[in-house]
Amino acid sequence: MITLTEENYIKAIYHLGKQGVETVNTNAIAEALQTKASSVTDMLKKLAEKGYADYIKYQGVNLTVQGKKIAIGIIRKHRLWEVFLVEKLNFKWDEVHQVAEDLEHIKSEKLIDQLDAYLKHPTHDPHGDPIPDRDGNFKQIEKILLSQAILGNKYKCVGVKDTSSAFLNYLDANAIALGTEIVLLHKEPFDQSIKIEINNREITVSQNVAKNLFLKTV
Amino acid sequence: MITLTEENYIKAIYHLGKQGVETVNTNAIAEALQTKASSVTDMLKKLAEKGYADYIKYQGVNLTVQGKKIAIGIIRKHRLWEVFLVEKLNFKWDEVHQVAEDLEHIKSEKLIDQLDAYLKHPTHDPHGDPIPDRDGNFKQIEKILLSQAILGNKYKCVGVKDTSSAFLNYLDANAIALGTEIVLLHKEPFDQSIKIEINNREITVSQNVAKNLFLKTV
DNA sequence: ATTTAAATTTAGATTAGTCTAAATTTTTAT
DNA sequence: ATAAAAATTTAGACTAATCTAAATTTAAAT
C-alpha cells in the first residue's frame, strides 16, 4: 500500500522531472514540498526500496516506470476533479487547486472512471493541462508562450503557466479565458510589453503576462 | 487542526452514543474501529484534552457540544457524497459506503456547500438516513421496523438498518427500494415471517428482513 | 463480603514522517 | 589543484498513532 506522503513525493518528482530531462535533485524536492532536504533523503531511500524510484546517493532521483504510472494516475485524478469543481460546482479556476490536491488521493478506480464518464471524458483541465486517460496516455498540445508568438499571427489561448490566483483573476478581469482568440499586434522592444487584439478589443499586456500565457496557432 | 484519526474516533463515539443515552465505553469503540482498547484510551485522553470529549477514567466518554458539531459535520459530508455517488455516478447503494468513508474527510466548506446545492439539498441519503443541513440540524423521520408494523396498514419504505451488500442486493432483487409502498398482509406466528404486498405482488420475507427494513405510515 | 472475571489503563516499544546539527560529498572559484 | 561554498547525507531526537503485556479498577458471582 502506498501512503499519502509517498504519493506527494512521487508527484513532485514527476513534475520536477518534466521540465528538464536530467535527474531531480534533493533540494528541488524539498523546496517543492516545503520540507527539509534531510526528510527528502529519507523518503528517496524508501521510494527506491519500494521500486518507485531510481536513486543514487548525491546524484539525484528518477521515477521508475512503476513510479511514473503512479504519478500519472494521481495527475489524472487531480485534473478530473478540477474539471468537476469548475463545471459542476461553479468553482472559479483559481479556487480548484487546493481542494483537488486532497481529492486526488481518494483511492477508488470505479469512482474516477465514473467521474471521467460523467464529465464526458474531458481531455484538458480548467488551466489547459492535458488529462491522462485510463491507460495513462495523453498528448501535450503544441503550445507556445505569448512572449514567443509571432507578430500578426492568430492564436488561441490553451493554458497558463502561472496558476496563482493573482494571475488567473487578472485574466478573468480582462476576459481572457481558455479558447479565447488572440491576434498579436505589436511587440514593444523597450519593456517587452505586447499589444493584442482580443474580443475585438485592443489591450496591452506586460512581459510577465506574456511569459505565462500559452497559445496555439489557429 | 483535527487529524483524520481523531475524526474517525469522534464519528464512532457519536454513532455509538446515539443508540443508548449512556456514556460510550472503551471496548465498544475499539470494536467499532477495529483497534485495541489501549489505543482507544490514548485517543480518548487526547480528545478530552482538545475539548472534543468529556472523558472519565474507567467510566466512559461523551462528546462535548464541539465534538458533536464535528461528528455531525462529518456525517453531513458522508451522506451528501453517498447521494452524489448514487445519483450522479451510478453507484449502487451497497457500493457507496467505502468511498464515502474517504470523501467525508475532505476539508472544504465551499466544496460541501456547493455539492449540497448541486444535489438540490437532499434530506436523506440512499439508505434513508437524514442529512444534516449547514447548521447541523436534521429531523429523524418517525419510522418503525417492518417487524413492528401493524396488520393491514399501508407503509412506505424509508430506510434500512443493515447496510450490508447482502441485504441491499436482496432488496434490489425483490424490487424493494426507498419510497416503495408496502401493505402488511400476514404475520406468521411460527417463524415471524411476514407476507407483504409490494408493487401489486405478494411476497413473504423472513424475520431477519423484517427486522432491518424501516417503514413509515402512509 | 470476598473472590473471580471483565474492562480499562499504564508502561514501554514500534513505525512513519519529520526535524536539527554535524559530517560528508560534489561543485565552483580562484 | 586546492580551498571555499553548496548540496546532500547521516546521526540522533521528536510526535502521532499504534501495539503487547502487565497492572489496576470496576462489575459480577457466589
Image: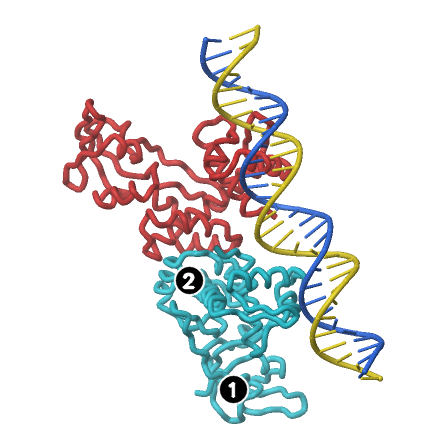
Chain colours: A red, B cyan, C blue, D yellow
Q: Amino acid at mark 1?
A: Glu
Chain to which the residue tagged by mark 1 belongs: B
Q: Residue at x 47, y 53 (%)?
A: A112
Q: Residue at x 44, y 71 (%)?
A: B131
Q: Are marks 1 and 2 on the same chain?
A: yes
Q: Residue at x 48, y 38 (%)?
A: A12
Q: Is residue A20 visible?
A: yes
Quickly name the residue at label 1. B197
The numbered mark, 1 or 2, whose residue comes first in the sequence reads 2
What is the C-alpha distance between the residues marked 1 and 2? 31 Å
**Residue B115 rendering spot, x and y as whole percentages:** 38, 61
Q: Amino acid at mark 2?
A: Lys
**Residue A105 rendering spot, x and y as whole percentages:** 50, 50
* Relative vertical location of residue B89 with respect to residue A73 in this rendering, above or below: below
Question: In the drawing, does residue C3 fall left or right of residue B72?
Answer: right
**Local secondary structure at mark 2:** loop
Q: Residues within 10 Å of mark 1 (few under 14, many from 20)?
A: some
**Looking at this view, is A161 or B58 the one in front?**
B58
